[in-house]
Image (cartoon, rainbow, N blue to C red):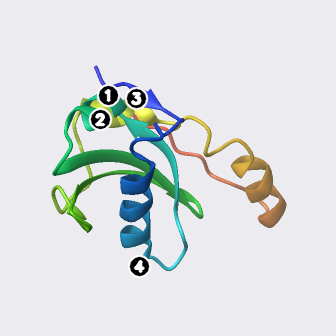
Amino acid sequence: MATVSETIPSALQHDVDAALEWFNRDQAIPFEVTGILDPDEALANASPRELKLVLCGGDRCEQRSFRVADGSVGFLDDAPATDATQAELDPPPGPRRSWLDRTLDQHEFTVVLFYRGFW
């Protein structure tokens, strides 16, 4: 079972920042890191380091996996993870604390869809 942590270990912060900066280059809305899956596994691998991050921006959150090595960053795969660990992130810890309040103020109605553990 995957472990999700809202706190990024200080030893991983540089690589997490690099992955976030790389990811945000192609995004219309900037994302922020709201969690990390299995931080102990990421700490065990020095290079290349595999990071599984929970990223939130605007109205959406995604879990994306990155490979960070010697200053270069890339996706582990081109598609978001679809295994059973994804459902445990819904709703991800922390990122939606005020989302519903902000959204209700902006629209006449809001549809929140929850299906088999996915938002």
Q: Height in image: 52 above or below 87? A: below
- The first of marks 3 and 2 along the sequence is 2
Q: Check contact, mark 3 vs mark 4: CB within 8 A.
A: no
Q: Secondary structure at mark 1?
A: helix
Residue 40: which numbered mark, if any? Answer: 1
Q: Check contact, mark 2 vs mark 4: CB within 8 A.
A: no
**Residue at image mark 3:** 88
Q: Amino acid at mark 3?
A: Glu
**Residue at image mark 2:** 43
x 41%, y 79%: residue: 25
Mark 2 Cα-neighbour bin, 10 Å: few <14, some 14–19, many ≥20: some
Q: CA distance from mark 3 to mark 1?
A: 18 Å
User: Which-is-in-front pick, marks 3 and 4?
Assistant: 4
Q: Amino acid at mark 1?
A: Asp
User: Which-is-in-front pick, marks 3 and 1?
Assistant: 1
**Residue at image mark 4:** 25
x 22%, y 48%: residue: 49
- The first of marks 2 and 4 along the sequence is 4
